[in-house]
Image (cartoon, rainbow, N blue to C red):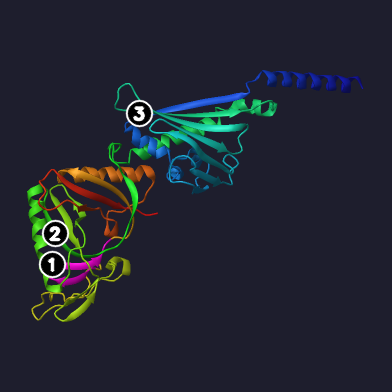
Amino acid sequence: MTRIFEMLVAALIVFVLAVLVGVLLPSHGHIERTIEVAHPQRQVFDTLNTFRRYPQWSGFRSFDPSMQMTVTGPDAGKGSKVTWTSASPKVGDGSLEIVSSEQDSEIVMDLDNSWAGTNKTVTVDVEPTAKGKTVNIRMSYDVDYGWNLLWRFAGLYINGDPAAVMQSSLSNVAAMLAGFPNTDYKDQDIRVVDVVAKPMLLVETRAPRSLDDVSIATENALNEIHDVMTRTGLEAAGPITTITTEWGDEEYEFTVAVPVNSATFTLNEQSYTIEKAVPASVLDEEPEVELDESGEPVPPKTGEKDRLGQMYVEGNVRAALGYEGRALYTEYTGSPAMLPLLRLNQKAYAETHGYRYSEYGPGRFFDEMVSPPDVMEGEQTFRVYLPIEK
């Protein structure tokens, strides 16, 4: 009986000591981790001010690569939210929601998961370093334990899983940024627009990478298009459009296009309808090439489709409906020599905001010269588009 009494007293003493220690433990937890990256401040902020790329940089993936994530709310900023489910006890189910963001500076997120505590927040601060060429990303985690003594004891391990997730997240962000075009687009107004398809006449061409050579190639293509417009009775119904195929080291491959006022036309007393181009690669079939008696390819007939699904009209002129869907859009006035930089800025913007894009087929860059042809070089106005997927 005495031994039982002694054990009860010992247990009571341990309990009292545990309570006293718990009372003395902090009621609030705070940790932070920092990483330095050599990328523009706007790029870093935009990458973290959206959850569209969160599945790629989330530190929880180091515990469970197969966790399922769903992004809801606005594409970026306040109200954006990501929820996840996981069979791993280290991850569990949870969510992050952006509750406030200050441009290029700070992002505050509410965290809801199984970690101990309430009022859990993750704060990301983006600050340029003293060197001015790099940026510090500081990620902080704050939590309240209140008078819940079990939570206070759990706070002793705040440098365990929470710190590991934060450090892994920052490392993933740095690795992801390394794959983005390192260009600062903060002074360029880029936004998402919806593009409506237009019937167009097109000519594929190429030229050395100089303004004069590109201008000559463009003029030759336009002459061919205008000849066909005269023969078909079609009229221009929009600005001259340039579709980039490949911006090579020495040569520029592109398509010159002119929107026209009708999707139907008549040529040599035969009627034709301009349709959406469906590349042969999508149809998994290549167009047949007819050969003459000498084995040479027979020139295609009007109405036949090329490998890109565009309709042959005459000579080098093709016809097809232009791109339809969402695109990144920006407008620029100045020398066309700056267009490659604008396209690079749009690619960087797409990467940081998590917009998928392809520089092939219907996803190619295109720009419209909206100023009159007689405007001096350097004072021309262009609309630049990069098609994006939802």
- Point out the image quarter for the C terminus: bottom left
Q: Which label number is shown at residue 47? A: none
Residue under the point 40% across and 37% down: 173
Determine the secondary structure under disc 1: loop
Query: Does residue 337 sit above or below 150 in this rendering?
Result: below
Q: Amino acid at mark 2?
A: Thr
Determine the secondary structure under disc 3: strand
Residue under the point 22% across and 65% down: 200
Q: Earlier in the sequence, mark 2 or mark 3?
A: 3
Cβ–Cβ under 8 Å for marks 1 and 2: yes
Q: Amino acid at mark 1?
A: Asn
Q: Which label number is shown at residue 135? A: 3
Residue 91, given in percent of the width and then of the height, sits at: 57, 41
Pointer 2 local density, CA inside 10 Å: few below 14, some 14–19, many at least 20: some
Residue marked by disc 1: 316
Identify the residue at the far right of this view. 1
Majority secondary structure of the magenta segment?
A: strand
Q: Is residue 94 left or right of residue 246?
A: right
User: Based on the displayed image, in which of its 4 quarters is residue 182 positioned?
Assistant: top left
The residue range painted magenta reads 310-322
Query: Does residue 146 sit above or below 367 in this rendering?
Result: above
Pointer 3 local density, CA inside 10 Å: few below 14, some 14–19, many at least 20: many
Residue marked by disc 2: 205
Can residue 169 be seen?
Answer: yes
